[in-house]
Image (cartoon, rainbow, N blue to C red):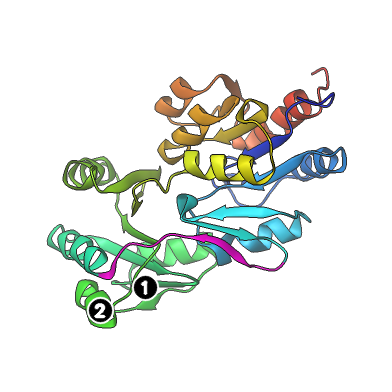
Amino acid sequence: MTECGYRLIVSDFDGTLRRSEGGISDANVQAVKKYVAAGGIFAFCTGRMLSSILPYARELGLEGLIVAYQGAVIAEIGSGKILRDVRLGWRDAAEICDYLQELKRHIHVYDGDLVYMNRDDEMRAYYERVCGVTGILTGEDIASFVWERKICPQKVLSMNMGAENEEIFQKLHARYKEKYNVTSSSDVLVELTVRGCDKGGALEFLAEYYHIPLEETVAIGDNYNDIPMIRKAGLGVAVENAVAAAKDAADFITKSCDDDGVAYVINKFGLGESI
């Protein structure tokens, strides 16, 4: 650790840095900028697609690396150059989609900056509004679309309403846990990436890239997909609004995403300020 505290702080975006109603608070913006000016490294680690998270990183004036798709993609913020790009095979992706179709799911398939969707419904509208992207409609049989075009995606996702999300997670985890990383980033999303492409592995990548020991890193998150990096970091942090499992994995519970929880962590552990 430096005299200012932990040298690398990695934060989830939705439900962690981003407020419930959207956007990043002034307190969080100022804390990030102050930490970076003091020599710290701040990075996003999200399940979002790269094109959906890059604008926020650039708006904050961040440099260095950014993590998308749970760790399947790691890129340079300034140039957009991809340093890591791990994809599902097209046969595997088509099989996953075929199974999700059997379950009558709303399905997304992510190929770089493109996201394919099988339905034009309220879930599509909600996702596009929150993430600021526009999906490409394939029709209900997205499995055949993936198969015929041999699409090798970074991620396949199922959107689910209410109690369905836990049910779908359990089914996908039971079927695919040995081969893929199956996780959930919100109460309406279940996501699959290549096994090993999780936020814990992404944190290790960032720490090695910046030559910073893991003991000198902080990871902040709110959901199941954040647990691997919360456990891996020198200091694992969950926001107050986090799911119980993330809180159980954390070393410290900060304020909620609506009460500037990330700023609190930066000031206390990154800058060593008395709070």
* Three-letter amino acid code at the position of disc 1: Tyr
Tell me the residue that label 2 is attached to.
Answer: 145
Question: Is there CB contact under 8 Å for labels 1 and 2?
Answer: yes
Q: 233 or 248: nearer the eye?
A: 233
Asked whether 83 falls inside the magenta stretch, the response is: yes
Left or right of 161: which side holds 245?
right
The segment highlighted magenta reads 79-90
Identify which residue is drawn at 55% across, 19% down: 251
| Alpha-carbon span between mark 1 and mark 2 | 9 Å
Q: Which mark is residue 64?
A: none
Location of residue 126 with respect to 252 vertically, above or below: below
Q: Residue 54, located in which quarter of the rendered image?
A: bottom right
Look at the image and tell me in which quarter the N terminus lies: top right
Please report the residue visible at 49 percent of the width from the left and 50 percent of the height from the top.
71
Which quadrant, please, contains the C terminus? top right
Q: Amino acid at mark 2?
A: Phe
> Dot 2 surroundings within 10 Å: few (below 14), some, or many (20 or more)?
some
Please tell me whether residue 255 is drawn above or below residue 155 in the rendered image: above
Residue 69 magenta-highlighted: no
